[in-house]
Image (spheres, rainbow, N blue to C red):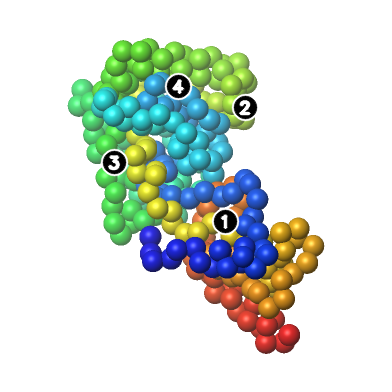
Amino acid sequence: MTDCDGSGHKLGCWAGGAIESHPRPVAGDAPSISFGPWGSTPCLFLNCNGARFMNESYAGLVLAQSLRQPINKDAGMVGNFAIMDKKYMQYIQKAGLDHGAPNWGFPEGIEEFQQEMESADPAAGTVKVRGLEIANRSMPFMNDIFVGSTVEEVLTNAGLTGDALEAAKASVERYNQMCADGVDADFGKKADLLIPIDEAPFYIATQGTQNLYGPGLNTLAGLCVNGNYQVLTASKNAVIPGLFAVGNCMGERYGNAYNCPSAGNNMGNAMTSGRVAGKFAARS
């Protein structure tokens, strides 16, 4: 997203350091990671072929799993989508602290969202709903929501036809059966998150799948360092004298995905790690 070209990472590797090993974290444009106004909520995710593709409660993997899905450019539905029913707030209340998830520090947004969802008319087919991320407080993001009085109707309104439509209907039916059984035999989602999609009206939010391939928010994978931010050798059993890596050049800052339960963790890390490394270097 800038003129950065990875020189810091390259220099560290040329000097004998190493980039952190897999699994490496991922990130992307938050509105594209999430599904419409309700974000990365653990409801039912399907791809453009009508197939379920992940344990939806692993919000940190939404980007990585979404990138692996097909894109049908010939249909109204060009990517992945999430489907919920009248019980949508039960799913939203189960959402975690993830980039792109609903934010409960935005109570007026929750109220507006509920009003817009409750007033959504299945006869309209598509309605506009404001998002639940706290960024909507100052810059509202309006999302298209497909609505229908039956599962087939909402899927059709979202653009699914033919085999994809039949597959999606079957996926919803299987999901509801697993909810009744209390066991997700396909992806292992916890039983308390298995809320059936069986009460009208039904809602669909799409994911900006084509935008997922754009630039990330920050550099996530980097050089392995010790607590003083000295770059470690590839074997991690020694440091490279005089070489430090901080901020975006430093690795192992995140788990398998970028998330921000608090704002500024990337910039805060850069400032803090730079200060700690500088103090250590001054003493050495």
CA gap between label 1 and label 4 equals: 31 Å
Numbered label attached to residue 221? 1
Q: Secondary structure at mark 3?
A: strand
CA gap between label 3 and label 4 equals: 23 Å
Viewer-nearest residue: 251 or 106: 251
- Name the residue carrying label 4: 51
Q: Secondary structure at mark 1?
A: loop
Q: Quadrant of residue 34?
A: top left
Q: Position of residue 15 (x, y in %)?
A: 65, 68
- Name the residue carrying label 2: 188
Sequence order check: which comes first, mark 1 or mark 2? 2
Type of amino acid under label 2: Gly
Q: Position of residue 136 (x, y in %)?
A: 33, 53
Sequence order check: which comes first, mark 3 or mark 1? 3
Q: Position of residue 214 (x, y in %)?
A: 37, 49
Q: Secondary structure at mark 4?
A: loop
What is the crowding at mark 2: few (fewer than 14 residues within 10 Å), some, or many (at least 20)? Answer: few
Type of amino acid under label 1: Ala
Q: Is residue 47 above or below residue 238?
A: above
